Amino acid sequence: MSASFSVINGEIVPAELARISIADLSIQRGYGIFDFFKTLNGRPVFLDDHLDRFYRSADLLRLPVKQSRDELKSILRDLLRRNDMANSGVRITLTGGISRDAYTIGEPVLLIQQRPLPDNEALAERGVRLMTYAHQRQIPEAKSIDYLMPIWLQPMLREKKADDVLYHNAGILSECPRSNIFVVSKDDQLLTPGRNVLRGVIREKILQLAHPIIEPIERDVTLDDLRTAKEVFMTSTTKNILRVVAIDGMEVGRGQAGAVASELSRVLSRVLQRELE
Amino acid sequence: MSASFSVINGEIVPAELARISIADLSIQRGYGIFDFFKTLNGRPVFLDDHLDRFYRSADLLRLPVKQSRDELKSILRDLLRRNDMANSGVRITLTGGISRDAYTIGEPVLLIQQRPLPDNEALAERGVRLMTYAHQRQIPEAKSIDYLMPIWLQPMLREKKADDVLYHNAGILSECPRSNIFVVSKDDQLLTPGRNVLRGVIREKILQLAHPIIEPIERDVTLDDLRTAKEVFMTSTTKNILRVVAIDGMEVGRGQAGAVASELSRVLSRVLQRELE
């Protein structure tokens, strides 16, 4: 499934031999951060945005990064050349390192893995069904490796015939585990939660690009806003923009492709094209 | 620091060579559970209680355990014999396993590590200073590897001159990251939070043993209960019973060793003695 090679610290190693010590704080205490970007036609998409966030997450979790941005780019270039995959997802992880007492941060270990991009075509065609759930990610501004909750929720998602979960805290929405959420309100504003979320790279692009089409507003968005929404869509690196057709079994808007989501998808595609020229 | 040997699945390996794949869900998503018991004079203490909880945590996190209890005990016996340490802490971890898509649970990997017991004598002498913090552990009944928050809080603890953190949710206490909390109320009841906590092995022993000395009550305990408490103490496998002398910089009770904590410590010591006979 994965590409042939991975990176541990600066070194390219065969993926099946990529291992780290069980004394690492990621395994001992679930402590680490990562970022994830995609390549199209072998070229990284929005790499600098992802590296910005990678360093920001590391900083938020107090993990020193030994590699400069240029060193990191150079390692990534070497890895992409060796693996030679056209379209892929690349994950850069920074672990808490080997801890002397299984508690204190050690010297972080840099891991890079590349794998084929998941295929979202069927989901894009059908639209996403969400289940809401009361939960707040810890230290939400950092892209930590903490995905205990969404992995634990998988059987419940299957049971409720939902594709993904949308977190809320006392009725105020935050995000999906790997995506941001946008709502076209009944007043034709584009709402997205303004706090307690990870600022996704596509989220930021949408906020920048939306203006000619619709007014984007970062503010608290509630479960009630969902009920009266004309459209709901989610954004992420792998999914770009995916329209949401049902939430907790209730149809969203008229249950059809949203005009705003479609128009924003076209604008985003053009930006992606330019990025790859 | 660590013992010479660890275990990966059934196999005893030199500790410095104990490694797992970076595709494991513990590293990818912070997904795994563990338990931790101590040995005194080379003998496990309350092993069956810890194994009960290990299997319960695995079950709660939907991780199948390949090893039966007898197999696990047999592996532990072999490891303890090889490492030959008198007093130690033994950690049994079960990871999410290698995930085909970096999201779905794979075949869990069993890890066992042994290390010297941390020395709590100075802390026992001086008493513990706690800092309260608003946080709720996710899936609290399971001993998951999620310690993102307490590790992240370490610099704040140092800044506030606190030894550990005590979580509360809207003023209702839950637990410390690695200990349970007990409060001797102004009405001479022994209170401990009854929900949203991990049921520590020493916590359960105290609830069983307290009756002749003081009435133990599991119920919601508030920040206000702390302010009027006669005594506060914490319990854990490594610490047994440690009295708390200050919370958020405020002295607890008269700031002296509590009579109840001392008496319970004596009773617990006798039970520990019997366990080792």
Image (tube, coloured by chain):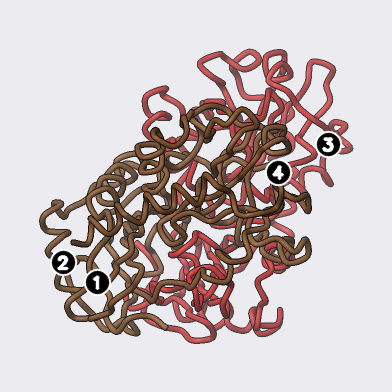
Chain colours: A brown, B red
- Identify which amino acid the numbered label 3 is placed on: Glu
| Chain letter behind tag 1 | A
Question: Mark 2–mark 3 contact, CB under 8 Å?
Answer: no
Residue A123 at what x, y percent from top left? 58, 66
Pick the quarter of the image with the N terminus of chain A.
bottom left
Q: Nearer the viewer, mark 2 or mark 3?
A: 2
**Secondary structure beneath label 3:** strand
Q: Which residue is mark 4?
A: B197
Question: Depth-wise, is mark 1 or mark 4 nearer the camera?
Answer: 1
Kindly indicate whether the residue at mark 1 contacts the one at mark 2 (C-beta within 8 angstroms). Answer: yes
Q: Amino acid at mark 2?
A: Ile
Mark 1 residue crowding within 10 angstroms, few (<14) / some (14–19) / many (20+): many
Please name the amino acid that badge 1 sits on. Answer: Val
Secondary element under disc 4, as helix, strand or loop, is loop
Name the residue tied to disc 2. Answer: A75
| Badge 2: residue crowd in 10 Å (few <14, some 14–19, many ≥20) | some
Disc ID at residue B218: 3
Residue that badge 1 annotates: A7
Locate residue A241 relative to residue A271 in the image: left or right. right
* Left or right: residue A121 compared with residue B161: right
Q: Which chain hosts label 3?
A: B
Image height check: is A65 above or below A184?
Answer: below
Q: Is residue B224 above or below residue A86?
A: above
Q: Which image quadrant for residue A22?
A: bottom left
Point out the frontmost of discs 4 and 2. 2
What's the residue at 58%, 56% (across, down)?
A: A148
| Nearer mark to the viewer, of 1 and 3 | 1
User: In the image shown, does B109 or A50 lie closer to the viewer?
Assistant: A50
Total numbered circles: 4
Which one is earlier in the sequence, the residue at label 2 or at label 1? Answer: 1
